């Protein structure tokens, strides 16, 4: 069995939590972690670019003037791409960049990211952290007590807590998620990871089953 030190809201030691040491023996494949990270980043890409084509420009489709006898160059409708204000011949259209890796591959990537954080000592387990009303100052004081203030940090809780979410949304480089929604992208994107005892137990049980 392996163990991780548990700290209270003041940053002092409050015991340890044990977990199966077999989790630390899991193989870490950097290529899979990279593929999973790129997938999550690509899925967040917005393909909302849009340029109007000839058929989307307002105006008549009628030929501007007759073909011969005017002395002008022959010309069709005003919406043609060769005229100023006309449509674009090969304009960019909305595109969906998202794709998905296999579900098992994403699960393995999350486990490897968690193991990497455990081996590097970047996971801090706190006993519990509850708030009666939203207070950003309390979260900032917790980060300061844990010596991770100013660093990119991910807080993982057992269940969604709206009060805690309201308290963390104004702190730069800080994100909040639950143990059920934890993924490799969240773990790799943040330097430090703060987990409650409940969330840590849920994550360990999730990846050692």
Image (spheres, rainbow, N blue to C red):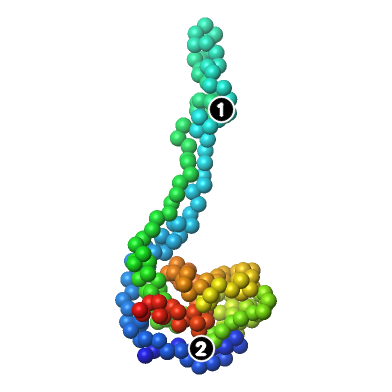
Quadrant of the frame with the C terminus = bottom left
Mark 2 packing: few (<14 Cα in 10 Å), some, or many (20+)?
many
Residue 89 percent across, percent down from the top left: 46, 32
Residue 38 percent across, percent down from the top left: 41, 61
Residue 193 percent across, percent down from the top left: 50, 77
Circle 2 is placed at which residue position?
6
Q: CA distance from mark 2 to mark 1?
A: 68 Å
Which circle's residue, 2 or 1, is located before the other in the chain?
A: 2
Q: Nearer the viewer, residue 114 or 188?
A: 114
Tell me which residue sits at (50%, 33%) in the image. Answer: 53
Q: Nearer the viewer, mark 2 or mark 1?
A: 2
| Vertical relation: 63 (above or below) 35 | above
Callout 1: helix, strand or loop?
loop
Callout 2: helix, strand or loop?
strand
Q: Is residue 31 left or right of residue 17?
A: left
Circle 1 is placed at which residue position?
84
């Amino acid at each position: 069995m392996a163990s991780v030190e548990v700290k209270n809201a003041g940053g002092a030691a409050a015991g340890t939590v044990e977990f199966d040491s077999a989790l630390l023996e899991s193989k870490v494949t950097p290529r899979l972690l990279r593929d999973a990270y790129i997938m999550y980043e690509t899925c967040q890409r917005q393909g909302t670019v849009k340029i109007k084509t000839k058929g989307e420009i307002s105006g008549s489709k009628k030929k501007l003037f007759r073909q011969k006898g005017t002395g002008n160059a022959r010309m069709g409708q005003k919406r043609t791409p060769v005229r100023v204000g006309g449509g674009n011949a090969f304009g960019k259209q909305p595109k969906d960049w998202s794709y998905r890796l296999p579900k098992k591959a994403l699960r393995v990537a999350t486990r490897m990211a968690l193991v990497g954080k455990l081996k590097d000592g970047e996971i801090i387990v706190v006993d519990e952290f509850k708030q009666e009303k939203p207070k950003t100052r309390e979260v900032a004081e917790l980060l300061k007590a844990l010596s991770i203030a100013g660093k990119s940090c991910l807080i993982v809780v057992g269940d969604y807590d709206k009060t805690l979410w309201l308290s963390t949304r104004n702190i730069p480089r800080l994100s909040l998620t639950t143990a059920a929604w934890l993924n490799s992208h969240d773990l790799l994107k943040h330097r430090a990871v703060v987990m409650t005892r409940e969330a840590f137990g849920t994550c360990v049980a999730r990846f050692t089953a």
